[in-house]
Image: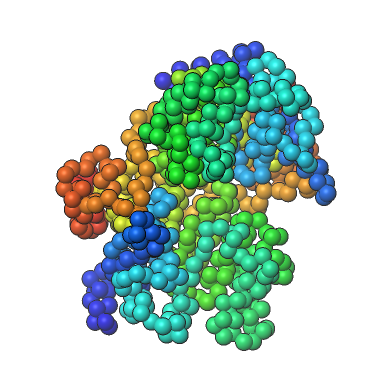
């Protein structure tokens, strides 16, 4: 089963032409009074159809900003300054707002972390989800309502007919997140970006939501970009993973490869520092120091100040993303013999 | 009272630091059709904390774990019940009699951004408990604050900085320094690492463990993260909707949960190992029932797949199995 999964996965990654979403060398910078903050600095992410792609990293690593750039939600002082975003063969990096509105919510949609603040408190949830359909498709309100009730049923909301008229405050966190997923899925988008969809939820509810997302992905063929800081969530449902740090992809690999043959010192440290359920240790592994300020990044590798394996040159030169194996890239000089993947 | 403690000591060879009996906490929840409503946050809970141990309180949000932590150190007043700290019932004491006890119980809060006053410098924050408890000498205080900062890993030169100049992990360290300033015996850690990034989380957890060894601290560690609890706790208490499901030593509780809810909680955690994903997991369906109208009988019965008739009629009593306590009519077999 696992091998099949791996095989299917690698095939999809080879066939570049079939990508639903292709982010190439994306650069989103923030022009603040104190200087330029390179929140996203040359990120390339490929999303094949029907796959779940994970982006992991700590706060401030640029994972959410990558998503916001793709959705065209970056606001002043943030700006896309380079690279391209290609959604099913169509360049959407700098398209006009009107064009973007047609795509957003229809072909590509997004779920946010906090389900309470992303729903409008003064409208019934049914109306809010219906709006997404009415905006993009020419069908009657009655038909749209039926579609909403269908999608509510699909995402596991009990008594969907009654819930259609509920207000957000009448629902629990788990149910609200289901509404958000329903809203994101109702137009059958090609890609759904989920930004920390389960962080605000309890473990038992988290497990339900993850299972639901996986099911929708399999049944409707929607690709999901899952942004999270939780390695457990990645291990649970992702097919391919990008590990980000200070605006750059540090390592990218298939999930199984990442957990078994992780190569970047940051990924290794990250995985080692999580307390494990099946191990008894007296001390946890720690990565010393803190995430660097993006305004004052080290001259060389952005991880060099915290890296246990850093060499002299790490402090002066920036490493590329080197290919170390099939679909496996690592941004570290230790793997310099590999082909550069940057900017490809 | 004195006698009680001695017998308890003989029985368990461990000294009881804090003991809660039949603790109840209710919050008013407005009125509905003329009837006043009550949130049953904690319902008849018995809990014992031994000196030098880490007892973890785990459960989903809304299960009453934070409320219980706060009631135990009287940040919230209990509706009824007894709390004995060092053998004295602290519930009915007035503020001045309670003051020496309050000094011995401190708390570390979840949100390092909200729990430090933005207008106070690090020095003022850490020094405040010292001032309150009568350390008059300025020089002495300064030395103590600097020693505390060193203890938790904050450089001395940050003495006059303000909270916004620190990262989340550093702020949590300042909160920890404030909590240990008065050499307390008991520290309530209310989700101390859940707002931190993974790489910072492990630093703070190691620090908490070091401090415990150095000062023989007793921790009540409130968390929803079972992997963190596995690392830090000696004993674990699982709560559901204001009631205790089971209490037991960490190892055996994780290996053989006795209460169905514990097993579902353990099953639900996403494991950081993709090889485990193919295993079909049993998941808990449904959501937490309302604490305003808790289900009769066992509070878990509406979500429990093993529930039988008796579960909805009668609340389970405490059962002891291999030295572990469980509140369930039909505890799981090994």
Residue drawn at x 33%, y 78% as measured from the top left: B89
- The x, y position of residue B299, in whole percent, is 28, 51
- The x, y position of residue B183, in whole percent, is 50, 75
Q: Which of the 4 image quadrants contains residue B322?
A: bottom left
Q: Is residue B204 above or below residue B125?
A: above
- The x, y position of residue A193, in whole percent, is 59, 30
Q: Is residue B184 above or below residue A191?
A: below
- Determine the residue located farthest toward the left in the rendered image: B310
Q: Nearer the viewer, residue B294 or A234?
A: B294
Residue B73 in sight here = no
Residue drawn at x 55%, y 52% as measured from the top left: B195
Image quarter where the N terminus of chain A lies is: top left
- Tell whether A344 sits left or right of A177: right
- Tell whether A168 sits left or right of A278: right
- Tell whether A119 sits left or right of B76: right
Residue drawn at x 34%, y 59% as measured from the top left: B34
Residue drawn at x 24%, y 54% as measured from the top left: B327
- Determine the residue located farthest toward the front in the rendered image: B34
């Amino acid at each position: 089963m696992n091998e099949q999964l791996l095989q299917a996965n690698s095939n999809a990654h080879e066939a570049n032409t079939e990508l639903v979403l292709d982010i190439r060398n994306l650069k989103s910078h923030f022009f603040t009074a104190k200087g330029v903050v390179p929140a996203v600095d040359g990120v390339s992410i490929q999303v094949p159809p029907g796959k779940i792609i994970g982006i992991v990293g700590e706060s401030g690593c640029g994972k959410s900003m990558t998503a916001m750039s793709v959705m065209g939600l970056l606001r002043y002082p943030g700006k896309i300054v380079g690279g391209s975003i290609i959604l099913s063969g169509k360049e959407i990096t700098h398209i006009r707002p009107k064009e973007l509105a047609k795509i957003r919510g229809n072909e590509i949609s997004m779920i946010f972390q906090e389900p309470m603040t992303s729903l409008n408190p003064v409208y019934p949830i049914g109306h809010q989800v219906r709006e997404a359909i009415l905006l993009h498709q020419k069908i009657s309100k009655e038909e749209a309502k039926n579609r909403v009730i269908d999608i509510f049923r699909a995402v596991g909301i009990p008594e969907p007919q009654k819930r259609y008229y509920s207000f957000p405050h009448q629902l629990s966190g788990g149910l609200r997140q289901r509404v958000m997923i329903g809203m994101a899925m109702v137009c059958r988008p090609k890609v759904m970006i989920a930004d920390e969809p389960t962080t605000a939820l309890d473990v038992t509810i988290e497990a339900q939501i993850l299972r639901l997302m996986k099911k929708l992905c399999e049944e409707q063929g929607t690709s999901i970009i899952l942004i999270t800081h939780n390695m457990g969530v990645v291990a649970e449902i992702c097919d391919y993973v990008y590990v980000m740090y200070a605006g750059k992809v540090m390592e990218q690999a298939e999930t199984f490869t990442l957990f078994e043959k992780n190569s970047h010192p940051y990924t290794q440290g990250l995985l080692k520092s999580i307390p494990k359920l099946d191990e008894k240790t007296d001390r946890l592994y720690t990565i010393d120091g803190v995430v660097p300020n993006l305004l004052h990044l080290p001259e060389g590798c952005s991880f060099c100040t915290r890296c246990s394996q850093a060499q002299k040159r790490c402090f002066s030169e920036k490493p590329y993303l080197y290919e170390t194996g099939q679909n496996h890239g690592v941004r570290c000089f230790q793997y310099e013999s590999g082909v550069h993947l940057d900017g490809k | 009272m004195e006698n009680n403690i001695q017998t308890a000591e003989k029985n368990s060879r461990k000294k009881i630091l804090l003991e809660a009996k039949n603790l109840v906490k209710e919050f008013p929840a407005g009125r509905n059709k003329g009837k006043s409503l009550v949130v049953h946050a904690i319902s008849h809970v018995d809990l014992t904390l031994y000196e030098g141990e880490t007892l973890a309180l785990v459960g989903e949000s809304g299960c009453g774990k934070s409320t219980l932590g706060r009631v135990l150190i009287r940040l919230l007043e209990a509706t009824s019940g007894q709390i004995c700290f060092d053998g004295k019932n602290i519930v009915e004491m007035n503020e001045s009699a309670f003051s020496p006890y309050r000094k011995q119980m401190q708390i570390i809060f979840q949100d390092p951004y909200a729990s430090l006053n933005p207008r106070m410098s690090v020095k003022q924050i850490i020094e405040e408990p010292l001032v309150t408890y009568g350390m008059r000498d300025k020089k002495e205080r300064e030395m103590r604050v600097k020693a505390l900062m060193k203890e938790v890993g904050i450089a001395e030169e940050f003495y006059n900085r303000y909270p916004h100049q620190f990262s989340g992990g550093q702020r949590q360290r300042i909160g920890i320094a404030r909590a240990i300033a008065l050499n307390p015996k008991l520290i309530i850690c209310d989700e101390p690492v859940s707002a931190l990034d993974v790489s910072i989380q492990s630093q703070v957890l190691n620090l908490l463990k070091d401090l415990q060894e150095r000062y023989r601290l007793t921790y009540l560690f409130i968390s929803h993260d079972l992997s963190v609890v596995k690392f830090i706790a000696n004993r674990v208490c699982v709560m559901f909707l204001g009631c205790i499901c089971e209490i037991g030593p960490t190892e055996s509780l994780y290996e053989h949960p006795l209460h169905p809810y514990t097993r579902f909680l353990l099953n639900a955690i996403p494991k950081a190992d993709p090889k485990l994903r193919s295993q079909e997991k049993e998941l808990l369906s449904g959501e937490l029932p309302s604490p305003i109208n808790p289900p009769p009988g066992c509070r878990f019965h509406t979500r429990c797949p093993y529930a039988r008739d008796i579960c909805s009629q009668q609340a389970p009593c405490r059962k002891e199995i291999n030295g572990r306590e469980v509140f369930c009519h039909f505890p799981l077999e090994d």
